[in-house]
Image: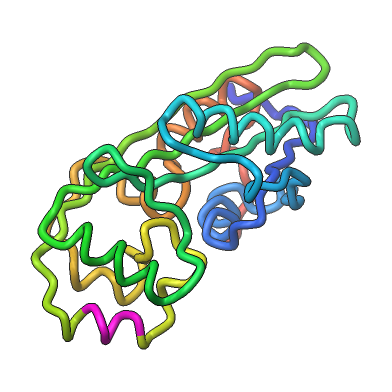
Amino acid sequence: MGNKSTKLFIFATSSQRRIDLIKNIYLNKIIFVQHCFDEKKFEIKNIKQLKILARKKAESIEKKYVDAVIISADTAVFCGGRFLGKPLEKQEAKKHLKMISGKNVLVATAVFIKDLKSNKKTSFVEKTIVKFRKLSKEEINWYISTNEWKSKAGSFAIQGKGKVFIEKIFGDYFNVVGIPICRLTKELRKFGLDYSYDKRTV
């Protein structure tokens, strides 16, 4: 039998993409709140720092709750070992697109889960390789004109118009969108949350 726990599950995120993906599976079983950690003051250069950032997002809200499971995540894009963050303006986005043109890009999502009452916690990193085809100057300029690059790590959105640039994906597609759903559901079961016990009308 599944665990019908009434424990509060809270996802600390401001990402609408993550919210949409998770809500579709868990309906009202997870509450979404914005984390209070200032990401702009935290520099990411590698996977280890990405895991720290995910944990800090959770820690920024955990004092508000007692008996709850806090979930947090952060996604980063790396090309040739170099971290590509969210571009601040068009020129930076163009630089990113030129860099990933014809290359394999690593997309990593760090997830942190903590049960505040028992202090049980876990963290993991899911990695996906995205292979980009060679982009022309005209294609890069077109993509910049769509404004889809704004607030996107690596300056692209795989679920949007950016999909036309991608030749192959090695790994979890949803990890690139923002959260590795398959791995997340496995881990949440260990904390008492099972999506298969949602009451739905078919």
Spot occupied by residue 127 in the image (x, y as percentages of width and height):
32, 36
- Quadrant including the N terminus: top right
Magenta stretch, main secondary structure, is helix
Q: Position of residue 65 (x, y in %)?
A: 89, 32
| Horizontal side, residue 19 vs residue 58: left or right | left
Residue visible at 30% across and 66% down in the picture: 95
Question: Residue at 22% across / 50% down in the picture?
Answer: 130
Q: Hey, which quadrant is residue 91 in on the image?
A: bottom left
Up-down relation of residue 131 to residue 108 (above or below): below
- The chosen color scheme is rainbow
Rendering quarter of residue 15: bottom right
Residue 142 belongs to magenta span: yes
Residue 6 on image: x %, y %: 79, 32
**Residue 153 on image: x %, y %:** 43, 56
Residue at 47%, 73% in the rendered image: 89
Q: Which residues are magenta?
A: 140-144
**Residue 103 sits inside the magenta stretch:** no
Q: Residue at x 64, y 29 (%)?
A: 55
- Res 152 quadrant in image: bottom left
155 sits to left or right of 54: left
Left or right of 146? Residue 163 is: left
